[in-house]
Amino acid sequence: MPIISNPYSYLPALQPYLLGRDSDKHKVGFAQLSLFYDPGFNNTNIAMSSIYSYRSLMAFHILKETPMSTKHGFEFLQYMMPAFTIAGLFHPEQGGSTKFLQLKKDAAQVTGDALSVNYQLTEKESHKVAHNEQKFTQALRRLNCFVLKKMNPGHGSGIHYAGTLPFSDKNEKFKLLPNGKLGQSNNVFVADGSGFTYLPAKGLTFSLMANAHNVALNALEG
């Protein structure tokens, strides 16, 4: 079955002018700023980034990365942490023949099968992701925020999923009709994002809610 998930990466960065300063009380664990990249100025296929401070995270998570003792490491981080910034970067995504999941027979499992997932970007898609990351790195630099490295946690890390039962006007197996009913079924309606064949970079919470509302109405009428 097909599946789509937003490519995701994050860019840890440093704001030098905040080194050694007291933490800003207005900084919390929520996003401090969002950036959108729309090179065509047409509101289509826009990548976006949410920028977070490190205030809500614990120092011990990165203490092991410091090349010094625990005592001196904490002293060092107290100086550094006010200047740490993390940019979470999402890319728009659509389906393709190299993005799918399936059950494979596996005698070692109690159920007799195991879930197998294949998710690969095309060369063009990978180039676009790298291009977007470069543009956001440049934008952060203009804000006096210098990216230290690029982190790619792997496919699925963006926790936005869709497309497993794509919409179709035909009454097909494993496809959804426009009213949300599962093809070749009598009373099965699917109200989540399974029918969507495209994911914008920004989480589509309101679109999911609107679709679920419409599907619920259709189910009542059906």
Image (cartoon, rainbow, N blue to C red):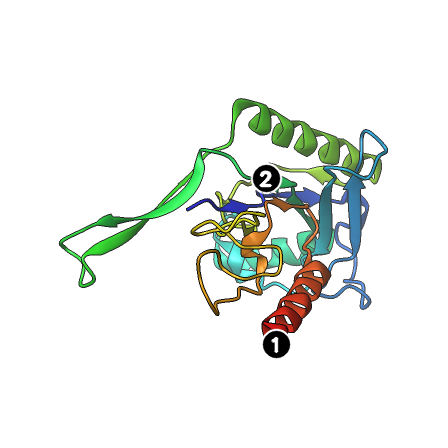
* Amino acid type assigned to the residue bearing label 1 in the image: Leu
37 displayed left or right of 168: right
Nearer the observer, 128 or 213: 213
Outermost residue toward the left?
A: 107
Q: Quadrant of residue 29?
A: bottom right
Q: Position of residue 44 (x, y in %)?
A: 77, 37
76 displayed left or right of 62: right
User: How packed is label 1: few (under 14 Cα within 10 Å), some, or many (20 or more)?
Assistant: few
Q: Position of residue 6 (x, y in %)?
A: 58, 45
Nearer the observer, 38 or 66: 38
Nearer the observer, 36 or 186: 186
Q: Residue at x 73, y 36 (%)?
A: 136
- Which label sits in the foreground, 1 or 2? 1
Q: Residue at x 72, y 34 (%)?
A: 137
The tag earlier along the polypeptide, 1 or 2, is 2
197 displayed left or right of 131: left
Q: Mark 1 = which residue? A: 220
Q: Which mark is residue 94?
A: 2
Any part of residue 133 in sight: yes
* Amino acid type assigned to the residue bearing label 2 in the image: Gln
- Under tag 2, what secondary structure? strand
Q: Position of residue 220 (x, y in %)?
A: 61, 76
Q: Position of residue 4 (x, y in %)?
A: 53, 45
Name the quadrant of the C terminus. Answer: bottom right
Q: Which mark is residue 101?
A: none
Q: Residue at x 72, y 46 (%)?
A: 49
Q: Quadrant of residue 178?
A: bottom right
- Under tag 1, what secondary structure? helix
The answer for how far apart the CA atoms under marks 1 and 2 are is 31 Å
Circles 1 and 2, Cβ within 8 Å, touching? The answer is: no
Any part of residue 160 in sight: no
For residue 59, above or below residue 37: below
